[in-house]
Image (cartoon, coloured by chain):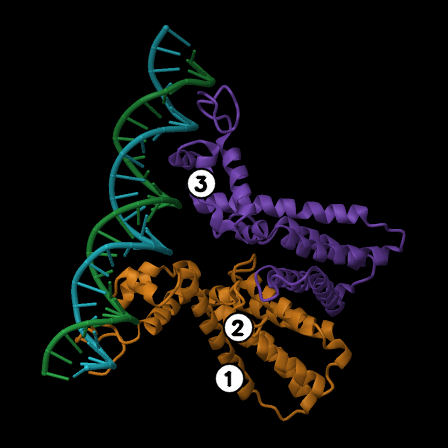
Chain colours: A purple, B orange, C cyan, D green
Amino acid sequence: MSSDSTAEPSRPYHHGDLHAALLETALDLAREGGPAAVSLREVTRRVGVSPAAAYRHVRDREALLRAAAREVQARMVVPMRERRARSDGPADAAARALDRLRGVGLGYIDFALAEPGWFATALLGAGDPPDEGPAHAAPFLELLAALDDCVETGVLSPSRRPGAEFSCWSAVHGCAELLVRGPLRGADAETVRTIAEKVVDDIIAGIR
Amino acid sequence: MSSDSTAEPSRPYHHGDLHAALLETALDLAREGGPAAVSLREVTRRVGVSPAAAYRHVRDREALLRAAAREVQARMVVPMRERRARSDGPADAAARALDRLRGVGLGYIDFALAEPGWFATALLGAGDPPDEGPAHAAPFLELLAALDDCVETGVLSPSRRPGAEFSCWSAVHGCAELLVRGPLRGADAETVRTIAEKVVDDIIAGIR
DNA sequence: ACGCCATGTGGACGGTGTTCACATGAGCGG
DNA sequence: CCGCTCATGTGAACACCGTCCACATGGCGT
């Protein structure tokens, strides 16, 4: 009788940490179905709590979505770093910096392809309120670091550094959207790979 | 007074062309408020007809949105062509081709900035069903033509032509999203202009 | 032990998309 | 000119959504 949804025998009358549970469930829903699939009612239903309970921990559906977006952004950099760790780097520092920049771009696109629902959610991260600074989403920081690395190793001239992050982010993000929701959605894997690599290589060539 | 579109005292018992009226109203709503603001009930309310009436002319809300998206795409190229017509082009053919390519990119971004609601709607254009070919949205065609022009005038090597459209579209579309919904939303006009021009110039440099 | 107050509940309101049986009238065949 | 037909529009209904309210509950500090 007392068996509840989360399989805990002693039902937490006051559910230990509802905020975390809501966020996690929102992430589950967003993963398959994107932000549109995240309804406060469905989230609370899955957690096993009344819809109104959510409002003790979250201002609105929008706020929950923004929190999920920030979490997705954080998770987005994980594969990027794994890729960098895996990369066999015996080459010189310059080549490594370039490869790192390439890896950030391809990692971004790969994430979008592997997790389209999450990717669509990630953009809602920056809230209109003075949430946080300008743009310190995790993937963006990764890009900044890779670009700075390029400058340090002489791959990128310091005079061409300013604004390069916007060009790179634009190309890579635009490519991801093109492949995930745009006219190229559903293309075969090989085509996708070819295009992704070309876009990344083209923009890197362009900013140098 | 008598012949009109919407405000005729003699109420059209069967409303001459509901489909067109729905589409136009959907465009109005999308213009301010984006796709989320397009509700079938509000559309029908504004047209002065019952909600169910819409279903005689449109499969779903989704279908109406897709129709609106296609219309927006068509309207998007108008400013692009005006810009090209305005451009004083005494320079040689090569410089003109390059300027045309630049104009397509900047026109795309300008449209996104001038009509963010419509821009957000435009992406829903390609339906999952084999709606139409791969990607013949009007702005994309404009880009293809500009690129071909570059090849013809020798600005772009034919060997570098394949796939260039994807790189360009990615950079420009990504930039538009960056400026409209992304972390740079709300930046001052000068910054916006600087970034837009840099992104366009960088990607053009990259594909050459 | 008691009471405060954060937390969770049930119900309500107004909004949405969508479908149904039904009404209406425009245009056509006779 | 009449009457039938069928596309078009209606009203009500269903299921869902976000959100707020007055109220219940019980964990925890005093």
Q: Nearer the viewer, residue A128 or A173?
A: A173
User: Are both tags, 3 and 1, on one chain?
Assistant: no
The answer for which chain carries disc 2 is B
**Callouts 1 and 2 close, C-beta under 8 Å:** no
Which residue does the image show at 74% across and 47% down from the upper left?
A81
Q: Earlier in the sequence, mark 1 or mark 2?
A: 1
Give x and y (percent) for residue A14. 45, 24
> What's the residue type where badge 3 is placed?
Glu
Up-down relation of residue A203 to residue A32 (above or below) = below
- Residue corresponding to mark 2: B110
Q: Residues within 10 Å of mark 2 (few under 14, many from 20)?
A: many
Which is more toward the observer, A28 or A139?
A28
Relative to B162, A8 lies left or right: left
Q: Amino acid at mark 2?
A: Asp
Q: Which mark is residue A42?
A: 3
Element at label 1: helix
Few, some or many residues within 10 Å of mark 3 (<14, 14–19, 20+): some
Q: Are marks 3 and 2 on the same chain?
A: no
Decide: is B75 above or below B54.
below
Which quadrant does the N terminus of chain A fall into? Answer: top left
Reading the image, the residue beneath label 1 is B82
Give how far across and how far down residue B20 sits, in percent.
Answer: 35, 74
Parent chain of label 3: A
Q: Nearer the viewer, mark 3 or mark 1?
A: 3
Label 3 element class: helix
Q: Is residue D23 left or right of residue B108?
A: left
